[in-house]
Structure formats: structure tokens, C-alpha cells
Amino acid sequence: MDINSTTLRRAMTIMAPHLGYSLPKDHAEVLEAVNKYRNLLYNLYASHKLFDNYKVCCDVQKFPNKCNQTLATCDDYYYGLTIPDDMAGVVAAWEYGEPMTLRSRWREAHVGISTGGLSKRALTQMPETSSTERELTTVSRLKIFTNRDTDEDKIVIIKGRDANFNLITAHVTLERDSFRYTKNKFSRIDSVVLPELCGHIELQTEEGCTLSVYYPHEHVPSYRRYKINSGVCHSGAILVQGTRNYQDLAVDTDIVEIGDILILQAAARYFRYNENSTDKEDIQRAQYDLANLESLLNGLVARHRGRMLQDGSPTSRARRGNINSGIHSINANKRLW
């Protein structure tokens, strides 16, 4: 969840004096500290479950299953979805408005348990990753488009297989407002390596089918796919809720997810004394500020969540009810003594 969000500019203004810096002179140093603070919050997911409210509607796609070992034609492919690159992990999914069961990839990667026997509306993470959002389904040359002059002459490297399954590598030089083509035809894409981009670029087949749109924060794209197990009649889209991937901020109007003043100040002091000093007292002060940060964060999260976590299984609810009833009985008996 995002709580008390603020702008990057305001967060930098709050943190600068506690870091021992001043703006605008130390802009780069303060910006780095704000992004480190955000990165710290993202890495506290196990204990605080932050930033898990990212929802996206994913199109259902047909992916090839080239290593099928049966004669059934339906085993040549499976239906699934690709989660966007800025989603770290899936925490919930819905089809036809009904919640789906989430299955981890160990079913596919480790023990090979089939998903065919699972209950309907299940989503299983596939073990492989892909360099493109959509599958290359034909043997085709590839083309790349950019509309930014600042990305001209930058090189995109694509590795894969040709029609004979031989390894091939293409170096594509970008040109503004123009498609640049690979010389060879690809039957499979194994990896894509991107330069430092200023804007987005689009990778297509020669026929104009969009395989991926890449953005400046991507360098070696890696997309995860999920298999859908929902019987013969599946929907055309799945609503997925997941945790967000961390990405640096740079623009003053970018959003810092948690902008609580006391938490920002504690984080600034932690970075100041923990990283810029070898003095034992400074290091102890830093550990105090880190503990203070987590304490403040616990209070902030608990206050905003309220009692959302009180539900559970019918058994656990009944058990809590019995315990509460027993406590009330004891208290009543105490008053009689």
C-alpha cells in the first residue's frame, strides 16, 4: 500500500538537512538517498507487505508447448499470461470475477506435477522467463522503432535461433521515426540486451505484430509467464494483483510512496551515520534510527490497515471465538469470587 505519498521534491527537501546536505548544491546525493530509502521499504516486504496493491488486466495468450509428448493437438500450446515487467510477484488473480488459486512454479520445475488435475481457475507460475511480452509464433525478421532522437545510433542486441535452429545474433542500430530490421529471420528469441534508453522502443515482427514495448528502466528484459487452468471455457483477460518492482525516481513530480515526515527524517539520519562514519557512537545512532524507522513504519501501516487482517479460516475464527468466550467466563467468575 502507498501511505501519505509525497513528491520526490518534497521528500528531498525533508531529508536533505538530516543527511547533512543542502539543496540544490547536493541534489545528486540527496536524490540517491531518497531512492535508497525507497529501496529499503521495498525490501521490507516480508515484514510489512508494502506496495502489493498494483493491479493490471492481462490478456490471455496462447503459448507454444513444443516439447509435448502426446498425440493430442491441444498439448501443442497452453493458455496463459505474461505479467508486466514492473510487477515483481502475483499475490491474487481473478477470472470472471472469481478468485483464482495461485500455484508456485515448483509444480512445473521440480516435481513435474501436472496442472491438468487442479481445481478450476488456477494460475501456475511457469519456470521459464521470456525476453518478450508476446511469443514469436512465426519465422520472421524483426524490426525496432523509436521516436526519440536521443536514442539514435544506440544498439540493441538480439540473440536467438533461425529457421534451422542455428544460433544467430543481430545488432540493430536505432534510428528516429524509422523501423530498423534484422538481417536474419528469427524462429525464437533467447535474449534482448538494451542500451541506456531515453524513451521507449517497440519490437515487432516483419509483419507488424508487436512482441514487446521496452522502457528506459529495462536493460535485460525478463518476463514471467503463468499457465491458466480454467477448463475449456476461459476468459480473454485475467485481473492480476501483484507487488511492484522497485524503480529509481528522477523527476521532481515523481511519487515517493511513503512520505511520512518522521520516517523520512529517521531514514536520512540512518544513511548519514551508518554509511559516512566509522565512529562507534555514530554507528549506534544509526542502528537506533533504523529501529525507530521500523517502529514508525509499523505504527503507520497498522493504523491504515485497521482490522483488515482479522479474517481467516472458519476453524481459526471459531477457535478465536471459543478462546474469547473462555476469557469472558473467567473474568465473570473472577467478579464472583
Image (cartoon, rainbow, N blue to C red):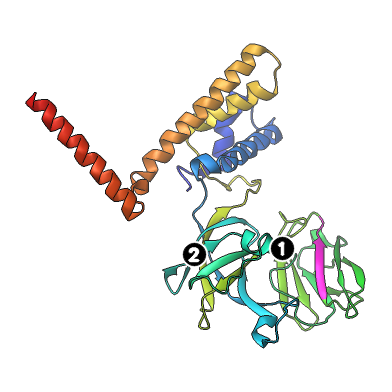
Looking at the image, is 253 positioned above or below residue 81? above
From the top left corner, tell me how far across and down residue 64 is, in percent: 71, 78
Q: Where is residue 192 in the image (x, y as percent from the top left)?
A: 81, 63
**Residue type for callout 2:** Thr
Q: Residues within 10 Å of mark 1 (few under 14, many from 20)?
A: some
Position above or below: 59 against 83:
below
**Residue in the image at 59% along x and 59% along y:** 104
Residues in magenta, as a range: 188-195
How far across and how far down the image is residue 27, in percent? 68, 34
Q: Nearer the viewer, residue 49 or 107?
A: 107
Instruction: Kindly identify which residue carries mark 2.
Output: 101
Counting the numbered discs, the total is 2
Can you tell which quarter of the image residue 219 is in? bottom right
Q: In which quarter of the image is residue 99?
A: bottom left
The residue located at (69%, 30%) in the rendering is 26
Quadrant in the picture for residue 88 = bottom right
Q: Earlier in the sequence, mark 1 or mark 2?
A: 2
**Residue toward you, 288 or 181:** 288
Q: What element carries label 1?
A: strand
> Between residues 123 and 12, which one lies in front from this camera angle?
123
Q: What residue type is labelled 1?
A: Thr
Give the alpha-carbon distance from disc 1 to disc 2, as whole Å.
21 Å
Which class describes the residues within 10 Å of circle 2: few (<14), some (14-19), or many (20+)? Answer: some
Residue 17 can be seen, yes or no? no
Q: Which mark is residue 30?
A: none
Left/right placement of residue 201 relative to residue 60 reads right
- Judge from the rendering whether residue 246 lies leftward or rightward of residue 233; answer left or right: right
The residue that disc 1 covers is: 129
